[in-house]
Image: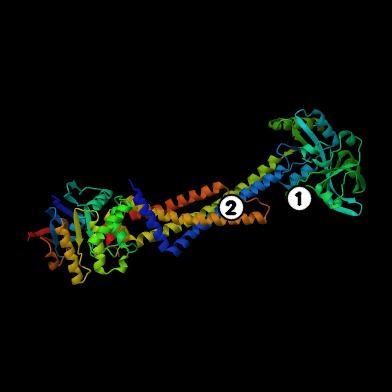
Amino acid sequence: MQISKIELGEGLKIALNALKTNRMRTILTTLGIFIGVIVVTVIISVIQGLNAYVKKEMSGLGADTLYLSKMPWIFRSYEEYLEYVKRRPIEEKHYKFILEHATLADVVAPELDTRKTVKYQNESLDNVTVVGTTDAYSVTADAVPEQGRFFNMPEVEFRKNLCLIGSEVSEKLFQDENPIGKRMKIGAHHFTIIGVLMKKGQVFGESQDNTVIIPYTVFEKQYGRRNYMTILIKPKDPRQLEALIDQLTGLMRRARGLEAGKPDDFAINQQSQLMDLYNQLTRVLWIVLIGIGSISLVVGGIGIMNIMLVSVTERTREIGIRKAIGAKRSIIMWQFLVESMFISGIGVLLGILVSIAIALIVRSATPLPVNISTWVLFLGVGFTVTIGLFFGLYPASKAARLDPIVALRYE
Amino acid sequence: MLIELKNIVKDYQLGMDTVHALRGVDLKIQKNEYVAIMGPSGSGKSTLMNLLGCLDTPSSGIYRLNGSNVSEMDDDHLAEIRNREIGFVFQNFNLLPRASSAHNVELPLIYNGTPAAKRKELAEKALKKVGLGDRMHHRPNELSGGQRQRVAVARALINNPSIILADEPTGNLDTRTGDEIMDLFEELHESGNTIILVTHEEYIAEHSDRIIRLRDGKIERDEAK
């Protein structure tokens, strides 16, 4: 079957005229597809935005940083939690043992934390995160001094009361003053400020800059050993992360004196575990929402089929005239397919436009970086063609197969 | 020979019954003849017209139109033949209601792929020929019945078909307008067209040179004047 360009053009014109004549009907028919497209594209975009947001937040944890601690980050029940709580704490000796023996590790930093009130002259700030660590923390936690310096190992060994402050603490307590060299109170003890950290922003809505960093030795002396220590470890070669985990497991079992066959009583956590959990949770959500969107698109498509059948019936006489005069089946088919694809196309186009608007609103009203990506647009074009073709095919072939004698007699 | 029908039979299945619409029709029509087909309703007149117009194919028998056997062609092939060989004029005009006269007249040219400029030129010429040069852009509902039928005649003419097939062309017109249309056919005949007229009105059939009378699916009489 061949259709000439002229015939294609005529089909296009007929379809457009038909849509223009039945403007209200076209708009109403389009509505189903319109809503379906909005549902699908907005859902996809919001989920993508959420993914990007979570990924960005989690990247604060460092993709290749291992977090060795007593408790795993993820547990399935309260009972499990109670088991973990009973484990022996991670202590300074473990940190030192790993520092000495973990040959695959590039940097090893202990981390102890608590919350205290900090004071400078008459100003005070509550609920500031106090971290006890070493200068390795600047690498493992990306805590880089913007002014001043980090404390060095001798200063840690000698338990000097030195501290670095986060940018938020600096702004709130010192405003325009230079904090370097000033003495401030963290809880009940006095510290000399030797550095101000670079601004880090928020992770999961919590400011990373409302913090002070002190030597972990000082932390243990002043604020006690009851706090859980976490050891942050970065590999020399990110590709050897698994080998490092094995090495750390071996070292810890030795340090803990665990006999063969006994389970580990510590956990080596990493960002990817959280990512996996997140992906698991959202996969179900994703499937459900896409299902809803698809259903609304199919309903929209059925609407198109319905109106196309009406259109074919209304124009039976016209089809008869065209066939009598020499229109082939294919050209009649084309004429109606164009019409149904136009209806679905208008729906998809408007749907995408409104979706973009919704995405912009969501982006400005929430922290989610919602974006309509180009592949969603391609998806839209795909939907148009598929829905238009699929649901237009039956009415169009019905029109094409009409017997001209019967059609000409149709009143 | 322009048209040659050999032992044409057409049966319809109507529920459980078989209707024998044509029971063996033999007919020859030469180029530039002016033929009227007459007969009471149920005589097979419409069926014969549908077959002659290639809107349908016979149950058996052979129909040769301009040398090619159209009795066994498929739908699309028939559409091509209709486009090239036949110009229809119907009782109820059968114009596209939302299209201008010019577009209605152009229609057959669209389906044989004539470029737009050429179509416009030919449509204008055809409309002038039927005396509607000043009604090019009117829609059917802005025209009188006679004018509408003239548009239909122009449409039938535009492709220079072998046959102009007119089915009760004056049936929806008053006597005076009907006569005008018949005069138009007379002119077309004189300028070399072959015209087949289907009618049940004696005075309309009188315009033709040869009257074929059908009864019960067979040719009862075939007389030239």
Image quadrant containing the C terminus of chain A: bottom left
Q: Do the residues under discs 1 and 2 have CB atoms within 8 angstroms?
A: no
Image quadrant containing the N terminus of chain A: top left
What is the chain identity of the residue bearing mark 2? Answer: A
Cα separation between marks 1 and 2? 26 Å
* A288 relative position to B172: left or right: right
Residue drawn at (81%, 31%) of the image? A99
Instruction: For mark 1, give the secondary structure.
Output: strand
- Whether residue A403 is visible: no
Q: What amino acid type is highlighted by mark number 1? A: Glu
| B118 or B193, nearer to the observer | B118
Q: Quadrant of residue B11?
A: bottom left
* A129 relative position to B193: left or right: right
Residue A75, image x and y in percent?
72, 44
Q: Which of the two labelled residues, at mark 1 and mark 2, occupies the earlier sequence position?
A: 2
* A208 relative position to A404: left or right: right
Q: How is the image coloured?
A: rainbow
**Mark 1 neighbour density, 10 Å: few (under 14) some (14–19) many (20 or more):** few
| A226 or A160, nearer to the observer | A160
User: Is B170 drawn above or below residue B77 in the view shown?
Assistant: below
Q: Quadrant of residue B125?
A: bottom left
| B5 or B156, nearer to the observer | B156
User: Is B138 drawn above or below residue A389 in the view shown?
Assistant: below
Instruction: For mark 2, give the secondary structure.
Output: helix
Q: Are marks 1 and 2 on the same chain?
A: yes
Q: Which mark is residue A43?
A: 2
Residue B5, image x and y in percent?
14, 51
Residue drawn at (48%, 59%) of the image? A30
Q: Which mark is residue A206?
A: 1
- Whether residue A330 is visible: yes
